Image (cartoon, rainbow, N blue to C red):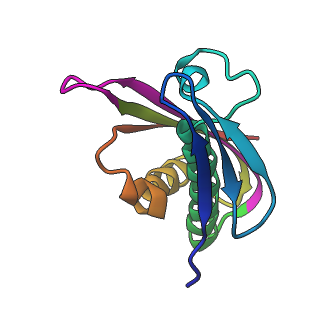
Amino acid sequence: MPTRTARTAWNGSLETGSGQVELSSSKLATFDVSFPKRAAEEANGSTSPEELLAAAHSACYAMQFSAMLGGAGGTVEALDVKADVTLGADPAGGFMLTGITLTVRGEVTGIDEATFQQCANDAKASCPLSKALTGVEITLDAALES
């Protein structure tokens, strides 16, 4: 399996510095990052490790869930997966991820609600990024739509 690479070029202190995150493997984009914007409610044109992790987790979960649904006999028409990654205070000092919420809405034929829910939970447990993030509580809100 391939290795994917990203890199960050950073200048300055935590409080006043900033950087650029480059998606090196795909060469698709470079994004601005700064701690003040990371800690603010509004991103104002910058990304953050949490947003990048949310993007990766939602994509990984969508792929895993699609595989689970297909294996259960379902036909995936559409999945809409959102990941919310929350940064908060670490009681030991500094910051930590305080939770991840996966929200998925799916249009899937050939399975019932119980099978959809089972596949949703199995995908949460077996998604490679969910496995990597075992130190963070991951909650799931899944609904089969018609």
Residue toward you, 68 or 44: 44
Query: Which quarter of the figure is the C terminus placed in?
Result: top right
Q: In this view, does 13 lie to the left or right of 19?
A: left
From which residue to which does the magenta span run?
76-95
Residue shown at 38%/59% (left/top)? 131
Residue farthest toward the top in the current orientation of the protein: 41
Residue 135 seen = yes
Residue toward you, 110 or 145: 145
Residue farthest toward the front in the current orientation of the protein: 12
Q: Is residue 102 above or below residue 8?
A: above
Q: In x, y percent, where is residue 111?
A: 63, 57
Residue shown at 42%/63% (left/top)? 126
Residue shown at 59%/82% (left/top)? 2
Q: In x, y percent, where is residue 104?
A: 62, 41
Residue toward you, 77 or 28: 28
Q: In x, y percent, where is residue 17?
A: 57, 30
Q: Quadrant of residue 7?
A: bottom right
